[in-house]
Image: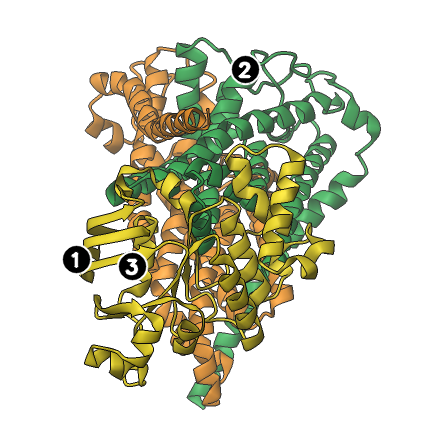
Amino acid sequence: MNVLELKDFNAYYGNKKIINNLNMAIKRNKITAIIGPSGCGKSTLLLSLNRMLEEVEGRTEGQILFNGKNIYSISKEEIRRRIGIVFQKPTPFPFSIYKNLTYAPIYYGVRDKKRLDEIAKGKLIISGLYEEVKDEIHASALKLSGGQQQRLCIARALTVEPEVLLLDEPCSALDIKNTANIEKMLLNLAKDYTIVIVTHNLSQAKRISDYTAFMLDGELIEYDETHRIFSFPKDKRTKEYIEGIYG
Amino acid sequence: MMKRIQSALFALWISVSCVLTIAAGLFIILYIFIKGFKTITWEFLLSNPGGIPIGVEGGIFPAIIGSLLLMLISIVFAFILALATAVYIVFYCESQRLENTAHVIIQCMAGIPSIVLGLFGYTVMVVSLNMGRSLLSAGLTLGIMIFPFIQVRIEKAFREFSKSVLNASYSLGVSKVYTIFRLILPQCRRDIVSSITLAGGFAMGAAAPIMLTGAVIFAPAPKALSSPVMALPLHLYILSNESISMEKSYATALVLIAILITINIFAITLTLWRKEVKR
Amino acid sequence: MRIGFDKAFIILIKVLTLFSLLLLSFIIIFVFKEGYIFFKEVPILKFITGTTWNPLSDPRNLSIFNIILATLYVSLVAIIIALPIGVGSALLLSGYVKERPRLIIRGLIDIIAGIPSVIFGFIGLMVLVKFFEKFFDFPSGESVLAGGILLAVMVLPYIISTCDETMDKLYRKHSPAAQAMGISKIYILRTIVLPQSLRGIVAATVLAFGRAMGETMAVMMVIGNAPIMPRLLGKCQTIPSLIALEMGMAEVGSLHYHALFAAGFVLMVILLMINVALYYVKRSLNR
């Protein structure tokens, strides 16, 4: 039932403690939203989950279990394949749309042209991008609009068939229409994937997530089903935050 | 009033400076073109030098071939080392101290005068390793000379690569090596090619390191790595310094400078193109 | 298979890097080794303070004080000429020239940097030396001054591009605010950009000085190559030109041969020091 489990988890940049003694379990095939003011450690938490924190020179203490196994006992390539991530700013590779989508599958040994075409097409359909770009999948990905780029990045993250998809404020740079597109897509994806989304946008969390975690100053304050968090917060700080006190 | 005069003097100084710089550059290029142009014929380009002393008659064919081959060897050697060093420093080196040391070393290598590199090539390759005065000895010596030049530019290109795109690649679970080959190298191709061509131009124009290690007054176009070679810069030096033939000196200089300007313009266009694409 | 390839690649990268970085020590060791044989015969102090270089006399006199002095002298003359012109050009480029023409001028400057030294030497021989002979009525136009002027043109591109890098940044940083107050470009350049780019200018000077000292062909063709006490309008001999000219005549293993390596070693040590200094100046620039 739990895909990811954090036990007595701490994270640091240098000597600065960013996450303090966090315990949390993330449920399979649900959308979990992490909310909290900027600097509360929610992005750091996300980066820890697939060991991307190492790339930005952070370090961790405590345990993260993925399907019951410590993520540090699995190679970082393997853990990242199985737990994908999409960042706040779209990061398309400077190649064609098609090459963006086949980049990782080729690494994992898919050589068959037909199979690659299928993967590319399939993931474009899932991300709702197919109809928009089907005639120009060999055009540069950099020519897409911001929202399209972000959906491409989600599609790209899915090309390696992860079990979990992490999203770090994926809509913060996008307009309402593109945000709606992405939210619709995420709701669809939740059937097959576990999704963890960090967001600033409370109404977004309310709209799409099953569970919501509220973080403040590196600590997990409250974690429950979304409707409970928003309707009957137990902690005073949660209540203040969702009422707009911290901004 | 005083301020006015100061400003005027300052303006005069900087404009005169710029005019002088541009004039010097144009003068050199135009002077060689005008003086050398009439001597350039197909025969000059495609025949061996002849006469006594050698070079009075005939052409510079073996020197053109020799210079191009020297450039090629030096580029290959320097590129392999420079690429490896840049990859290591940017993607694998974890100690800041080691990185700084490497930078000091490369800076120092860049500062070693080319004639001292010639001495090194001579004692190590020509004498100790018994490679003789040859295309290979001279080419490798030139390679050492241009190694820092290429390394610095490749490293800079790597560092300019967007960190977030790099992380996006790592986040797909692909390895660093795959990321380097599939994402970074293709994207830095233009910078790399431009740095190599520029460096090749430097290698081709250098006379000091090769006069001790492989370039000779006369040799036919080389057939093997162990043959001695003729090279344009050394040929020009001999023709002009010993007053063998001024006409042929101008023409040789023109050929050399024309090749180098072509190389330069190619490299500059590549860099400009890249900048436009980025925008 | 992929993991095997990755591992092999990483090992290859490490080996090649190690080799590249060790090259410097190879160069130092081998040049020193050949020079050391000479230093056993002639004490190093005598080598660099004695004034006579005559490999053909008996007993041989192999000291390079005059030659070191001339190497410094020619380079100094070059810097004195090139620095004001280079700094001035860089100022104009950073403040006045628009994007397009600027690229063209930078291109031309890159091309000057790419002109081989032997062509500079050739032009020096045909134009500069002839000019001195004609107009100043010298017995021969070959002189420290000719070498200095030639080197000045050669190091100009290095000075301009190093200065321009710093100045361009400064100008972009300060000009919007200053122009908003109605201050003229000239005034910004003179009172803000120029004084603030002092460190960049120092870096450029050190770089250019190093380049000038190591230059062989161009200098060799216009200084007359006489190992005497250098005077501005007289002939002289520099270390690189000494090596280039005499290496061909010196028999392998002879004292003369080792003396030339010793001279090369002295030159290299000077330049290594200059470049370590340059590294630290540059680093302080980037902070």
Q: Identify the disc placed on residue A45.
A: 3
Picture coordinates of residue C256 (x, y %)? 35, 17
Q: Nearer the viewer, mark 3 or mark 2?
A: 3
Q: Secondary structure at mark 1?
A: loop
- Letter of the chain that mark 3 sits on in the rendering: A
Q: Nearer the viewer, mark 1 or mark 3?
A: 3
Chain letter for the green part: B
**Residue C43 placement, left or right of C98:** left
Whether labels 3 and 2 share one chain: no
Q: Amino acid at mark 1?
A: Asn
Q: Amino acid at mark 2?
A: Ser
Q: Are marks 2 and 1 in contact (CB under 8 Å)?
A: no
Residue C81 in view: no
Q: Colour of chain A?
A: yellow
Q: Along the line of sight, which residue is nearer the eye, A230 or C166? A: A230
Q: Along the line of sight, which residue is nearer the eye, C266 or A45? A: A45
The quadrant of the image that shows the C terminus of chain B is bottom right
Report crowding for label 2: few under 14, some 14 to 19, many 20 or more residues within 10 A (C-alpha).
many
How far apart marks 3 and 2 lie (CA) works out to: 62 Å
Q: Please say if A190 is above or below C150.
A: below
Which residue is pictured at 82% across the width and 25% down the height? B43
Report crowding for label 1: few under 14, some 14 to 19, many 20 or more residues within 10 A (C-alpha).
few
Report crowding for label 3: few under 14, some 14 to 19, many 20 or more residues within 10 A (C-alpha).
many
Chain letter for the orange part: C
The residue that mark 2 highlights is: B134
**Residue A147 placement, left or right of A27:** right
Picture coordinates of residue A69 (x, y %)? 27, 41
Q: Identify the disc placed on residue A15.
A: 1
- Letter of the chain that mark 2 sits on in the rendering: B
Q: Please say if A14 is above or below C120.
A: below
Q: Identify the disc placed on residue A41.
A: none
